[in-house]
Image: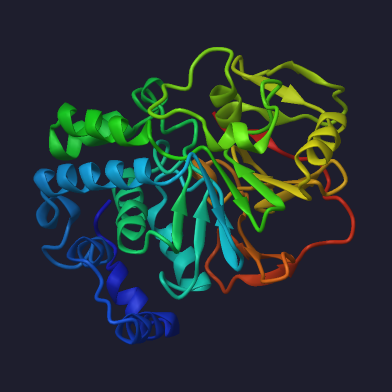
Amino acid sequence: MEDMPYLVVIMKAKDFQLFIIGLDKLGMEPTQLIINLLSVGLPDKGLTKTVSENVIMETLIKARELFLSQPSMVELDSPVKICGDTHGQYPDLLRIFNKGGFPPLSNYLFLGDYVDRGKQNLEVILLVIAYKLRYPKNFFILRGNHECANVNRTYGFYDECMRRYQSQRMWQSFQDTFCVLPLTALVGDKILCMHGGLSPHLESLDQLRTVPRPTDATGNTLEMDLLWADPVIGLSGFQANMRGASVGFGPDILAKYCNMLNIDLVARAHQVVQDGYEFFGGRKLVTIFSAPHYCGQFDNAAAMMTVDENLQCSFEILRPSVGKPQPKVVPTTMGSPGAAACP
């Protein structure tokens, strides 16, 4: 799907001028890859016409080196905007940046699942990697369970690489990069972020800082749970996950781990939630999902969580229908349960 002039749409938005001004003030210019990705949809500007396989391969090598130079647990200060699954929904990713501010005007943390399900997996994953390379201290991405070869070989990413570039080698190079992505992030020492959830193997934050990479994240391991685990209403302790992978955990486990790790909030993704975000366990955990109208089968909204300088959280909601997303402040009561598993 390369028929939408994204750059034209973005240039009409107020934030695009600020984006360029911000780059000029910092003495920076957007890389050619970023410009090419934002130009997808203009005449003769389709991805496969402007971004060669060699450019992608070189980008992935640089990204792998950068990820390995940074810790397994990214530690960052606020303010930052936190986003969940995007799943190849490229127009919606651009809506997120249009609303939140194009990098580097805002700091971002993405919680994984960039590929599979959607129609433009390559544009999504390449843009977030390009932004990471351009602004390594302002833009952060974590690994999701779909950044695993055994998953994205099945759910669409492999097929897209083969259809658009006829390159299994390129798909494998993506896997080599995915397996060195960081698994967790810690915002302001108080908000622990991952794609999936908590693990019975987790004992300390230092353990997260030293998770070895590369990792295949398989079996009964900490890495597997960080990518796959789910909070479960009414559950006590840890139990086998209904997905058939990893574990589910109850609010008692959440409270115990928040106390043990001295954190206030767990921010994770991995599940479709109706309003784009949903609290669990007395607002000690929030699920964030950033792909509206997921798979074309759900009528869910998407959300982006903003953490300000005082670690106060608010949400921007992006509805599936066309219209301006409106800010939504953290409610004073826990959201109603309504999460659906996102395989």
Front-most of 89 and 280? 280
For residue 178, which quarter of the picture? Answer: top left
> For this view, does 214 lie left or right of residue 163?
right
Count of numbered labels shown in the rendering? 0
- Relative to 174, does residue 142 appear above or below in the rendering? below
Front-most of 62 and 246? 62
Percent coordinates x, y for residue 218 in the rendering: 49, 17
Residue ID at (84%, 33%):
256
> For this view, does 21 lie left or right of residue 195?
left
Percent coordinates x, y for residue 265 in the rendering: 75, 49
**Quadrant location of the C terminus in the rendered image:** top right
Percent coordinates x, y for residue 262 in the rendering: 78, 45
Residue ID at (65%, 52%):
276
Percent coordinates x, y for residue 252 in the rendering: 88, 30
Residue 179 visible in the snapshot: yes
- Relative to 85, does residue 12 appear above or below in the rendering? below
Residue ID at (80%, 40%):
258
- Relative to 337, does residue 12 appear above or below in the rendering? below
For residue 332, which quarter of the picture? Answer: bottom right
Residue 119 visible in the snapshot: no
Give the colour scheme of this rendering: rainbow
> For this view, does 88 lie left or right of residue 281?
left
Residue ID at (23%, 63%):
41
